[in-house]
Image (cartoon, helix red, strand yellow):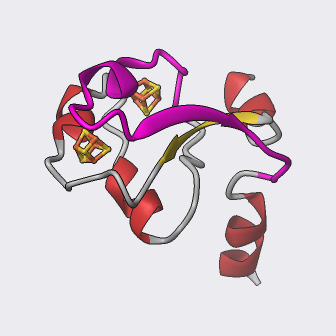
Amino acid sequence: MQKITSRFALTKISIDKDKCVDCHLCEKHCPMDIKLLSYKNEGKRNLSTECIICATCANVCPKDAIKLTMKFDFGNLIEELNYKS
Ligand code: SF4
Ligand code: SF4
């Protein structure tokens, strides 16, 4: 159920690419094993429906590059539909 609602969540984890130094600490500590840097490299927020917004990644980031941001998007729903078509 949470996976469905997370697609439409306004609040998601976002990495500031100008601050990030690719140390991978955020990924190493993520309890859900989310590949945060893949989203950053694609210029996207963390669109994973596995994210539980625990903020562990933000707390371990030595560059203060990770924030919770509010924005209107549909998660990866559009991409998934494109893959199926
Ligand atoms: S908020 Fe928690 S679950 Fe979500 S990406 Fe960060 S560490 Fe992983
Ligand atoms: S912990 Fe911070 S600086 Fe390190 S890779 Fe993650 S976002 Fe970038």
Q: Position of residue 6 (x, y in %)?
A: 72, 33
Q: Residue at x 44, y 19 (%)?
A: 55
Q: Which residues are magenta?
A: 50-74
Main secondary structure along the magenta-highlighted residues: loop
Q: Residue at x 68, y 32 (%)?
A: 3
Q: Quadrant of ligand 1?
A: top left
Asked if residue 44 lies left or right of residue 80, the reply is left
Q: Is residue 65 located in the magenta-colored stretch of the structure?
A: yes
Q: Residue at x 75, y 42 (%)?
A: 7
Q: Quadrant of the C terminus?
A: bottom right
Asked if residue 37 lies left or right of residue 73, the reply is left
Decide which of 27, 59 is in the foreground and name it.
59
In this rendering, the answer to whether 75 lies above or below 58 is: below
Q: Residue pushed farthest bottom?
A: 85
Occupied quadrant, residue 38 = bottom left
Q: Quadrant of the N terminus?
A: top right
Q: Position of residue 51 (x, y in %)?
A: 52, 30
